[in-house]
Image (spheres, rainbow, N blue to C red):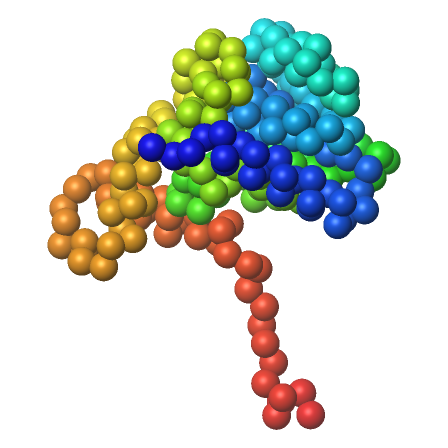
Amino acid sequence: MIKVEKIIRYIVSWLKKYIQKSKSNGFIIGISGGIDSSVASTLVAMTGFPTIILEMPILEKENFLSIKHAKFLTQKFSNVHYLVKDLSILFTTFFHTINDIDNLKESLSSVNVKSRIRMLTLYYYSNVKNHLVVGTGNKIEDFGVGFFTKYGDGGVDLQPIADLTKSEIRLLAKKLNIFDEIQKAKPTDGLWEDKRSDEEQLGATYEELEWAMEILKKKDCSKIENPILKKYQILHQKNKHKMIPIPICKIPNDIKK
């Protein structure tokens, strides 16, 4: 069993040290009503530094879980400021501008645009306020299967919970008294109109992917025939470009001179 209280204290301390070193004024984080953003935003709030929690609906109905979590944070922490910015007009205008209305709904390209517009909005306020943009990705998403939008929700300044699996984040959520509805809600990126879950998109549960990630750390597992392992390997390879530094074409000195 992980030492939940120690992990919480460590992350909060790490955030405090990071912001003091960066000379920034505070943090900004996007919230969705999901467990990852709820845990990450609570940890950021616990630093005592100015914290903006930003909800960014795009063609969505009111998100009661997000609103409930925002009220919880603003009532508990005086350093937290809650903003809601509806980006629907910006989103639809983009597709009108590029004359591609057919891709406005239910396509991978359109949901990636949603994610990137949200990143743009976070960095607008980040620049205005001199705040750091905080990521909400977990270990499986960020380093296992690359389940995030490149330069969208993957575009952040720091990642406080990216070394924790979904199972570990659930333990932190319980300790931090995150609402039960958020803890029990099926994980979703909130980008699709049909509300499809993360696990429906991935084709496996987070627990299964955590198991596969752990198994593949071992040297002698190449002969194991398992559909979850195969799924993990396919996703990891497909999305590897998101998880590694941008490739640079290094020019040999003898060519440069």
The residue lying toward the viewer, choosing from 214 and 200, is 214
Report the residue at 38% width, 34% height from top: 2
Q: Quadrant of the N terminus?
A: top left
Quadrant housing residue 250: bottom right
> x and y percent of residue 195 in the render?
47, 16
Q: Position of residue 244 (x, y in %)?
A: 50, 56
Which residue is drawn at the image coordinates 61% and 80% (left, top)?
A: 251
**Residue 135 pos. (x, y %):** 60, 37
Total numbered labels placed on residues in the image? 0
Question: Is residue 138 at least partly visible in the picture?
Answer: yes
Q: In which quarter of the image is residue 253?
A: bottom right
Taking the view exactly as shown, the residue that stands out farthest to the right is: 128
Q: Is residue 171 left or right of residue 205?
A: right
- Location of the C terminus by quadrant is bottom right
Q: Which residue is drawn at 27% across and 51% down?
A: 216
In this view, the residue in front, 174 or 180, is 174
Query: Is residue 104 in view?
Result: no
- Using the image, determine if residue 115 lies above or below residue 250: above
Q: Where is residue 18 in the image (x, y as percent from the top left)?
A: 69, 46
